[in-house]
Amino acid sequence: MMDHHVSTIKPRRIQNQNVIHRLERRRISSGKAGTHWHQVRVFHQNVFPNFTVVNVEKPPCFLRKFSPDGRYFIAFSSDQTSLEIYEYQGCQAAEDLLQGYEGEILSNGNDQRSVSIRGRLFERFFVLLHITNVAANGEHLNRECSLFTDDCRCVIVGSAAYLPDEPHPPFYEVYRNSESVTPNPRSPLEDYSLHIIDLHTGRLCDTRTFKCDKVVLSHNQGLYLYKNILAILSVQQQTIHVFQVTPEGTFIDVRTIGRFCYEDDLLTVSAVFPEVQRDSQTGMASPFRDPFINSLKHRLLVYLWRRAEQDGSAMAKRRFFQYFDQLRQLRMWKMQLLDENHLFIKYTSEDVVTLRVTDPSQASFFVVYNMVTTEVIAVFENTSDELLELFENFCDLFRNATLHSEVQFPCSASSNNFARQIQRRFKDTIVNAKYGGHTEAVRRLLGQLPISAQSYSGSPYLDLSLFSYDDKWVSVMERPKTCGDHPIRAATECFLELREKDNRWQTKFYWHTEFRGKGPPVTQPTRQVKEGETVTGLGINGRSCNATRGLV
């Protein structure tokens, strides 16, 4: 008789992960067409961070991130007025310093060699090339705002300056069109500037200013760079400014979307309202009192009305008329570029936009808008199952994590089984929670949209198909994480441990052979941390603190 205690399920066979075996296999086998880069990527399981230097001395600056090609590293000066550009020298630059040192960590030793290594390590890896004075007239650079161009030649940074209470800005400077929101102490007005700097020469190439406005610079929420198209959302004026970034590092005005969608719309309006043209010519224009609906809002309302007509029922039209006033009061809160022609805009109430209300359950709408044809293509509610399905299946098209790379290595729910399991587990948790449910789960998941530009990492060490780690402490999204009391571990199938030693109030160098992509922040919740990326073997995990000594 067959022994019923013997399992008939065969365990999954784990492939040989020996580096010699993998090199030989790569030599004799080419693999399937188009899978070469994916086969090479598994070598990161053999070459992983294995040495940590704790409490490294760094210059008095705020570390930001590496350029996508790993050649340059940028930081903000301590007074947040200048951009510091460093050239990365490669992991071999500190070979003589660490030669003969045994173990996996160089901690806070007081011996002469340890002190010498911690004091000289940063300058070995990074050589200061340029210090570019960027912010002027009382402005300060935002430490969480930076966008690299696809050719890794230029970086875009933002600065802001508070407006003084006296003298108060003129009324029509604050309210430039009928969609302008009312500022309040939680959402004060500022003067903003966007600067583009050449990383090779350190030259400030161009600057665009936005006076008496509100642009969310933190985490690049108010600006989005897709290839050479830069979009900037003015929350105060409810206007989207679109620029083209040239290879020489200058901004070219492309279009302004808000009050008008076409540049010659003013002529059309003047034919119906002659006073608009007359006031514009005399310099006494007051768009805040325009008798018509702004062009972008009008296109949104027209789309909703046509959809109600297509429904064919009287109830759909009644609902449109019932909520017409609420729809007119919607304001743009966030946006992102889906490609060079399409905008993805989030609309919600003015109280949410001006931060008077922080309730995440507030109703909101997502709009897909074609900038070329000036058409609204689709409108979704924040509880739309259809939009959630699109987001889950095509998440990478929203993230645009590595546009500069020929080969994409996303780790999202739409391209990675392990990431999909994590998202499903998160969704099930909300569905089964108290005061939860399916609608609340959809609202929470869609709350991630729109996604800020260059906010996701393509690091192989964060690829869940290669390494397993606790996503509560580290993730592919560049955001501050809470500081744990234990090391963060990542393991492969054969439990090859990738350790990240975590010490409070310190930054560390991870010295290894290959490290591609931005590592995630691990820091105290109240402070920001910036992570770098490089192609030759260095990962920087830094947290901000009041001390002059930083951790790398």
Image (cartoon, helix red, strand yellow):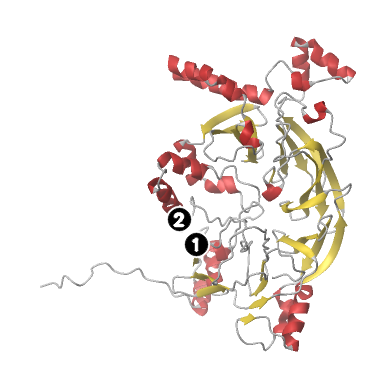
Residue 464's label in the rendered image is 1
Quarter of the picture holding the C terminus? bottom right
What x and y, as percent, mark residue 465?
48, 62
Element at label 1: loop
- 216 over 15 or under it: above or below: above
Indicate the quadrant containing the N terminus: top left, top right, bottom left or bottom right.
bottom left
Q: Residue at x 63, y 55 (%)?
A: 406
Front-most of residues 115 and 484: 484
Q: Is residue 513 above or below residue 386?
A: below
* Location of mark 2 (residue): 422
- Mark 2: which secondary structure? helix
Amino acid type at circle 1 is Leu
Residue 101 percent across, percent down from the top left: 66, 87
The answer to which quarter of the image holds residue 357 is: top right
Pick the front one: 183 or 254: 183
Rendered image quadrant of residue 303 = top right
Q: Position of residue 193 (x, y in %)?
A: 81, 44
Type of amino acid at the residue the image marks with label 2: Ile
Distance between mark 2 and mark 1 Cα atoms? 10 Å
Q: Residue at x 43, y 55 (%)?
A: 421
Horizontal side of 488 relative to 157 (left or right) equals: left
In the depicted view, which residue is nearer to us: 352 or 40?
Answer: 352
